Image (spheres, helix red, strand yellow):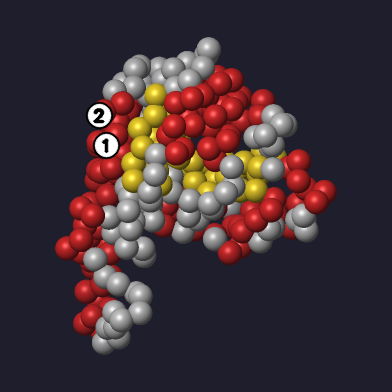
Amino acid sequence: MCKPNADEHSHSHHHGNGHPHTHDAEGQTTRVRVERDVLDKNDRLAEYNRGWLAGRSVLALNLVSSPGAGKTTLLERTVRDLAAEFPVSVIEGDQETDRDAQRIRAAGCRAIQINTGVACHLDASMVARALSELAPVSGSVVFVENVGNLVCPALFDLGERAKVVVCSVPEGDDKPLKYPHMFRAGEIVLLNKMDLLAHVPFNLDRFLDGVRAVNSELRVIPISALHGDGLADWYDWIRDQVARPQRAAI
């Protein structure tokens, strides 16, 4: 498990050089219990977010990927293309800088930047604060662009309707098998940068076989955020999510 955020420093455990591990049974048990406590706390906050969103009829989608897969470019184009259909706002997650939020605002929608510092993911408490500040209107869509990382964001529910896994062909076709937890947690995969398929050693069939091996229910939409290929299917999927009733927290 990755390092908790600043609100969870009391639960922190370290794996870097100069921070020895505890290998005895008691130490292992304590670490597992602490990690479970962190995740349980996050899950409770995520359910609060889910109820908050459902009560306002707001759809939240959590975009996750490796760095450089093209999430921000995809969001820029999505914001511009769908702005006439429903209000859109964006929560941007990065360790440092507000460059992505600036790009999204320039595309024409409200955006809040969350800088996580040493943390490698967004969590439900960060998103709760951002939602309160954004105050999205009823019937709107909130996109959460998570920190670039295919590991930790799979573990942290934010209260979103679905995790959207964004991959790109330059990354290689082995990602589903190397990062299975993310592909199990996702509801849809957008395979981006298909315009580069002829120029990189990427086997589409191998990628799709890997996805099916990990999560046979996962839908894959090949796209090019730069050129617009496949985006009509992505937009139709968003429209279907908007039309579905929200599930409130129990």
In depth, the one of 103 and 196 nearer the eye is 103
Q: Position of residue 24 (x, y in %)?
A: 26, 87
Q: Which corner quadrant holds the C terminus?
A: top left
Left or right position of 203 against 156 = right
Identify which residue is drawn at 35% across, 79% down.
17
How dense is the environment of label 2, judged by Cα within 10 Å: few (below 14), some, or many (20 and up)? few
- The answer to the question of whether label 1 and label 2 lie on touching residues, with beta carbons closer than 8 A, is yes
Q: Residue furthest bottom?
A: 24
The residue sitting at 38% across, 51% down in the picture is 95
Res 82 visible:
yes
> Could you say which quadrant of the image residue 33 lies in?
bottom left
Residue labelled with disc 2: 132
- Residue 141 appears in the figure: no
Report the amino acid beneath label 1.
Ala
Q: Residue furthest top?
A: 84
**Rendering coords of residue 23 (x, y %):** 30, 86
Left or right: where 198 falls relative to 5:
right
The furthest residue to the left: 10
Q: Secondary structure at mark 1?
A: helix
Q: Amino acid at mark 2?
A: Ser
Q: Which residue is mark 1?
A: 128
Q: Residue at the spot x=53%, y=12% of the render?
A: 84
User: Could you classify mark 1 by the number of other residues whose Cα lies within 10 Å: few (under 14), some (14-19), or many (20 or more)?
Assistant: some
* Residue 91 horizontal/vertical position (percent): 39, 35
**SS type, badge 2:** helix
